[in-house]
Amino acid sequence: MVEVTLSVEDLQLIQWIQAAQDRGITLEEWLIHSANSNSKNMKKQTDIPSTETQNLSGLAERAWNRRAKAGDSLAERERGNRHFLRLDSIRGEPVIGTNIGRLENELLPSGLLRLLPLKHALRLLWSLTSETKRSLPHGAYKDAMNQMLRLNGQKLAEEDNQFGRGRGERLAAGFSHLDDSARSRAINWMIGSPGGSTKLSAMEIIGWSTKDSEGYRLTPHGLDLAKLPNPILDRDLPHEGPFSPLERTLILDSIHHRLPLEWNIMRTIIDGMRGGAVGNERLDARMKRKFGEGTTFNWTNSILQLRRVAAVTRMSELGLVIRRRDGRKTLSELSEDAINIVEFTESGPE
């Protein structure tokens, strides 16, 4: 087996990610398929590097080959904490399931305001299935998730205090590390409830994991996101937020590609900020005209507000929206490159 390291520009990598997502396969599988196709058709150099392995490493300095050099895994009692989820602690490849197609009317749970815990949950699922090569049962995943959210939330809260992160900037938000009941609700939103419920979890809705008769598996899209270095988990990238630019691109691609209604809500709010900073009342009025009573959706005012809060909070986490206080009011405005990022996402393959 040959292990290959690639170094490419971010824009080129993003285009590859979008092409892989369009095919419903992982980025590595797409690169291998492209390399094989080119080698058969043309005996000359191409922009797609050839390879003999499905274990590509180092793509765009991701350097996940370090996991092969990791020492013994952490003790069982520490399973799920942030150091356990670092790239250099995860060895091997997980089993993966198939991607689910476009979900026209699905939305992420309105109570799930932060996406960073989902990134941690992806790494956790990868770490717990890479050695067994089997789906992870619900009970085992839930127990590990509960411990991971508590441990990582505590660590992030300490760092929030150390660096003086204010409201809306605190990375521990969403981990519910201080409240067992809230943490249990968050786990149910992220991975679903036990038993025979047919309701999709957030990880399934956004297309990053799937369930079979044995338990949970990553999808190709989920594995791609799990393998991207994260500034919080891996400490390898300079950052101004919880996600790297490449992670943000893949997350937005997932929402745009799979959840047109969720994207429609985001677009409605973004278009309402084009003229500058606006208050919540203006955004609620815009949401009401598009989704409120008397429309096809016929959402009540309380549902509209929940959806607005969820969308704005997640877009703030992704660096698209900036929120600030103005007296007793909260104002929201677009970041400098928000429109370019959104239009770039929409220009990708459907």
Image (spheres, rainbow, N blue to C red):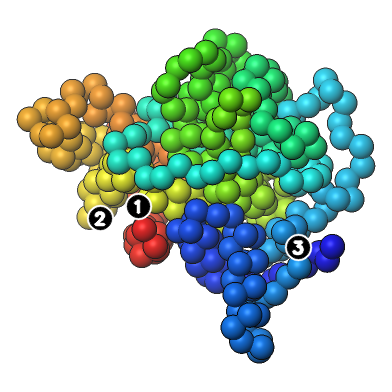
Which residue is identified by label 2? 274
For label 1, count other residues whose C-alpha is less than 10 Å away and answer few (under 14), some (14-19) or many (20+).
many
Element under label 3? loop
Residue at coordinates 35% horizontally, 34% vertically from top-left?
107
Vertical placement of residue 25 versus 326, above or below:
below
Tell me the amino acid under the disc marked 3.
Thr
Which residue is identified by label 3? 53
Vertical placement of residue 224 versus 83, above or below:
below
Whether pointer 1 and pointer 2 mark residues with C-beta atoms closer than 8 Å, the reply is: yes
Q: Name the N-terminal-most of marks 1 and 2.
A: 2
11 vs 259, nearest the viewer = 259
Q: Position of residue 156 (x, y in %)?
A: 66, 32
Residue at coordinates 86% horizontally, 50% vertically from top-left?
68
Is residue 126 visible in the rendered structure shown here? yes
Q: Position of residue 20 (x, y in %)?
A: 52, 60
Q: Position of residue 231 (x, y in %)?
A: 66, 48
3 or 2: mark nearer the eye: 3
**Viewed as shown, does residue 200 lie left or right of 165?**
left
Which residue is identified by label 1? 334
For label 2, count other residues whose C-alpha is less than 10 Å away and answer few (under 14), some (14-19) or many (20+).
few
263 vs 95, nearest the viewer = 95
**Viewed as shown, does residue 167 lie left or right of 228?**
left
Element under label 2? loop
What is the quadrant of residue 30 in the picture?
bottom right
Element under label 1? strand
Q: Residue furthest top?
A: 181
Is residue 242 visible in the rendered structure shown here? no
Mark 1–mark 2 distance (CA, rounded to whole Å) = 7 Å
Tell me the amino acid under the disc marked 1.
Leu
